[in-house]
Amino acid sequence: MYDSQLEDERMRAEENILNTHLEAVKEEAQLIQREGEMITTLERAIMNEEEYDMREYLADARQIAMQKIQMYE
């Protein structure tokens, strides 16, 4: 019975690791999608010679970078 309990605990721990990693991957995918949208918006503005706010773009990029750093600390 002791071996069975250890095996159950090991399986739960492994499932927790897997679920935590899966959530991190999902969050990172969302951040990458946001980055792609930001880049596309900026590229369109540049190509169409429209005004854009580079400070806002850089602030948003920095925020995303900080979120990524926090995810892996």
Image (tube, rainbow, N blue to C red):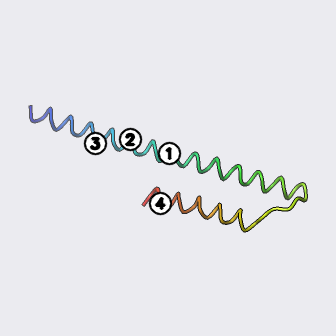
Instruction: Identify the disc placed on residue 70.
Output: 4
Residue count near mark 1 (Cα–Cα under 10 Å), binned few <14, some 14–19, many ≥20: few
The answer to whether the residue labelled 3 contacts the one labelled 2, judged by CB atoms less than 8 Å apart, is: no
- Mark 1 or mark 2: which comes first in sequence? 2
- Residue 36 lies left or right of residue 14; in this view the side is right
How packed mark 3 is, by other alpha carbons closer than 10 Å (few <14, some 14-19, many 20 or more), is few
What residue is drawn where x is 77% and y is 64%? 53
- Say whether residue 25 is left or right of residue 57: left
Q: Nearer the viewer, residue 17 or 57?
A: 57
- Mark 4 / mark 3, whichever is N-terminal: 3
Outermost residue to the bottom: 55
- Cβ–Cβ under 8 Å for marks 4 and 3: no
Q: Nearer the viewer, mark 4 or mark 3?
A: 4
| Residue 38 image position (x, y, % from top left) | 71, 54
**SS class of the residue under badge 1?**
helix
The kind of residue tagged 2 is Leu
* Secondary structure type for disc 4: helix
**Are the residues flagged by discs 2 and 4 in contact, CB closer than 8 Å?**
no
Label 1, label 2: how far apart the Cα atoms are: 11 Å
* Above or below for 33 versus 60: above
Dot 2 corresponds to which residue?
18
How far across and how far down the image is residue 44, in percent? 83, 52
Q: CA distance from mark 1 to mark 3?
A: 18 Å
Which percent across, then down, holds residue 54?
Answer: 76, 66
Residue that mark 1 sits on: 25
- Disc 2 crowd, CA 10 A, few/some/many (<14, 14-19, 20+): few
Q: Quadrant of the N terminus?
A: top left
Q: Which badge, 1 or 4, comes first in the chain's sequence?
A: 1
User: Mark 3 sits on what residue?
Assistant: 13
- Residue at the image position 64 percent from the left and 61 percent from the top: 61
Q: Residue at x 84, y 56 (%)?
A: 45
